Amino acid sequence: MTSIDAALLNRFAAIVGEPHALRAEADIAPHLRELRGLWAGRTPLVLKPGSVGEVSRILKLATETRTPIVPQGGNTGLVGGQVPHATGDEIVVSLSRLNRVREIDTLSNTVTAEAGVVLEALHRAVEAVDRMFPLSLASQGSCQLGGNLSSNAGGTAVLAYGNTRELCLGVEVVLPTGEVFDDLRKLKKDNTGYDLKNLFVGAEGTLGIITAAVLKIFSKPRGREVGWAGVSSPEAALALFGLASGLAGSNLTAFELIGKAPLDFSLRFTGNAIPPLAGDWPWHVLMEISSGRSPEDARGLIETILSEGSEKGFAGDAAIAESIGQANAFWALRENISDAQKPQGASIKHDISIPIASVPEFIARAAVAVESVSPGARVVCFGHMGDGNLHYNVSQPVGMEPSAFLALYRPMNKAVHDIVRDLGGSISAEHGIGQLKRDELLATAPPVGIDLMRRVKAAFDPAGIMNPGKVL
Amino acid sequence: MTSIDAALLNRFAAIVGEPHALRAEADIAPHLRELRGLWAGRTPLVLKPGSVGEVSRILKLATETRTPIVPQGGNTGLVGGQVPHATGDEIVVSLSRLNRVREIDTLSNTVTAEAGVVLEALHRAVEAVDRMFPLSLASQGSCQLGGNLSSNAGGTAVLAYGNTRELCLGVEVVLPTGEVFDDLRKLKKDNTGYDLKNLFVGAEGTLGIITAAVLKIFSKPRGREVGWAGVSSPEAALALFGLASGLAGSNLTAFELIGKAPLDFSLRFTGNAIPPLAGDWPWHVLMEISSGRSPEDARGLIETILSEGSEKGFAGDAAIAESIGQANAFWALRENISDAQKPQGASIKHDISIPIASVPEFIARAAVAVESVSPGARVVCFGHMGDGNLHYNVSQPVGMEPSAFLALYRPMNKAVHDIVRDLGGSISAEHGIGQLKRDELLATAPPVGIDLMRRVKAAFDPAGIMNPGKVL
């Protein structure tokens, strides 16, 4: 089953101690398969180091013996970046035991935490000192900070607070040689040489293992309001976004676009759900306003946006959540879309971004492309409009054989991604490259960029042990 | 005078055409000396390419012939990064003719502009379409975008909008080989491989030449208010900052700390200046609030901050500018500090950052260190407190011989920077490394980080032609 010899496995296991070196099939199993079951890898050994020093000794030995390493956090990634290949010649290093929140500094507004801290645990630790960490993902109950950093996770709060990259001030990284790059700085300004931090963030564990990071935290908002608006077209949604962001700046903490199909699916899926609006609209906007000043301030601001939006003809019907329960219900309609798609049969999904100005054109052209690949397929378009990031999912035509629809995976991807590329967009806005999009990236990205990435990879990991076959 | 032979110089000159290949001493002179006169280099040739293609041909020839290249923008850098060495064997490439604003997209809120665009011209172009580009520097009338990007320029608006790095969405870079890396994307989210953009931003022209960039632009604020507060200590200023940023979020567009000495110097220097406050305070805060909503909203917010700050004992006296003229007068007191220091004799300056929480400790410890190096020296401490970035300048003791004070340059630097390093700070928050801080960086930065930077440099510029002897 494995091409790593037993003596070498024992040397690796000795670094972390036998209780933290998983070899039994049942212990290893949860580390081999990602959530959607698209990849199932194999490994003879999962190591769970308990200190940065142990991570260092693992990577040093791996480089010396040319043993490939797959770093893993909460195993919630969606592109197969965190699972080993089926060859069985890679060792998985789980960072889950490095789960200490090392320090919270409420004056500098920073938290220093280790890679294995679960995102939700980080939220709680920060809330306990009256601050908030804005990164928010569907998987936050199990995803870990190291994975968030390595995949530059996005989520719903990017509009106001940025991606994980923008939330990160400093990193601690174990390099493939075992050297520790300690750059755990709390600084907002530091112009002392090349920006190495941003190379490791988003590298999907191919350049080293991030063991800890300094992250920005923020004052908790004193007021929050959630609104829902029906709009007649993506163009109207775009105009409403321009109005809202101009008025609210970073008080606009979410601006989500939702098509009629995903809303219908979500309403059907969510028990006892009441449609937010009485009227029937082809497109919907979920917006959230947060205020550091007061609840009244947040309320006044969202009312101004919706009434100006209505006067100018951008927004049709609109509703403001009148309770926390209703606000949560609005959000649930958005968050349940993925699950609500499942009863609709097979789906083909795209995680794309385009310049915000091009969102309407993309939506129009992609609808034609989808119909030409699979007549009757149902477009489930929703996402973070304020970031130009759409989850452009396609559900199979009603009554079609799911396997027949899934056979169209590649032509459907190509049809949608060709439009994305034509508009200067990205084929992976949030989820990364991993195994899923590696071939497509290499085939379609500008060769100069790929060559530069390969030079970085060779310079940082000359032995090629870090998560091989992912990204590049 | 030069070690580059005449035939080779002619080959370089032929690329841009003789009118744009400066060889006469008088034509070359402005490109050799930086503003403060600390470095005076030599070169046989200044090239002014008129297109990206010409930049590409220059670098290709330079790599083939191992000819060192010094890229130059508006020549306003403060660390000698943009001037050639005295050896005379380098060719200066001025980007000033690449000065086109290629596109402004008011829906995506982006501007695409070339490296030679003067910052103030970029401001005007963006204002003409009712937007604003927040990067604001003392040198904005002559500094160029390429230099801003290559030095990751800071300035007074970083608090709300970030450094130049955070304002940049995409770059176009000519690599040392002459290849063009076209990454001019308008995307806020793009997780397709390593973050190459951030390697070029802040690299001070040592990895390639940035020829154009996509930058974020913003809605113009509808209201702006400038306030001045006297505070009893840096601790009180820090508490006031926490209060202000909690209430205002990114509506807090400036929070500048000013010591008594720099304020006194500035008042003396600025003709007819009226002190903003009647009382006598050891420390002062200049704050600015911007609102996308209305002038009344900005006014209400700054009043809330100052009254809550006063109730809590953080702020003493406070004043809000009652006119644009008075707001400008407040800002002038801040902006004139550097010039106001000149009549006070010789000065030794530091551009440092520290974690915000450590600002008071730094100020206390540095005062002791300065006094021990030069008894009677006057600390001129001011800067962007909200970013933890202080311009920690020291004016000579009254009556001392300037040259005797300047002889203390190295021990003074060391005394101040040792405290910075001890507090996890940066010895170059805004201005970069260039020639000025290269030796200190190499001597004091963690060797692992320096080694990684050298690997990047070798991978991107194997011939070592890009701005040698700068940064690394």
Image (tube, coloured by chain):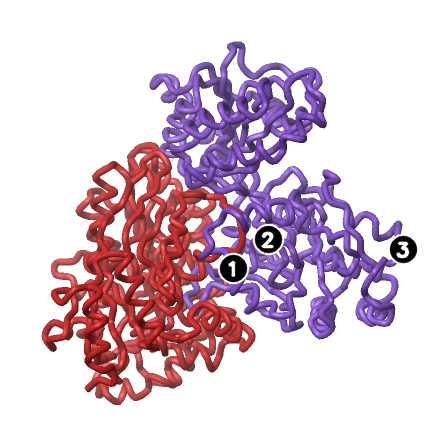
Chain colours: A purple, B red
> Mark 1: which secondary structure?
helix
Answer whether residue A179 is visible to the viewer in this image.
Answer: yes
In the depicted view, which residue is nearer to us: A414 or B424?
Answer: A414
Q: Which residue is mark 1?
A: A453
Q: Eyeballing the image, is A236 above or below A202?
A: above
Within the image, what quadrant is residue B66 found in? Answer: bottom left
The kind of secondary structure element at disc 2 is loop
Q: Which residue is mark 2?
A: A471
Residue drawn at the location 64% of the way across and 19% of the way down: A397
Q: Is residue B334 visible?
A: no
Residue A158 image point, x, y percent: 51, 41
The residue that label 3 is drawn on is A24
Query: The residue under label 2 is which amino acid type?
Result: Val
Q: Secondary structure at mark 3?
A: loop
Which of the pair A15/A358 is nearer the observer? A358
Q: Is residue A222 above or below residue B448?
A: above
Q: To which chain does the residue with label 3 belong?
A: A
Quadrant (top left, top right, bottom left, bottom right) of the N terminus of chain B: bottom left
Instruction: Tell me the quarter of the picture where residue A155 sits.
Output: top right
Residue in the picture at 81% in, 63% down: A3
Mark 2 vs 3, N-terminal side: 3
Q: Are marks 2 and 3 in contact (CB under 8 Å)?
A: no
The residue located at (44%, 73%) in the rendering is B462
In which chain is the residue bearing label 2?
A
Amino acid carrying label 1: it is Met
Residue flagged by tag 3: what amino acid is it?
A: Ala
The Cα atoms of the two marked residues, 2 and 3, are separated by 29 Å
Which mark is nearer the camera, 1 or 3? Answer: 1
Whether residues under marks 2 and 1 lie with C-beta atoms below 8 angstroms apart, the answer is yes
Q: What is the total number of numbered labels drawn onto the structure image? A: 3
Neighbours of disc 2 within 10 Å: few (<14), some (14-19), many (20+):
many
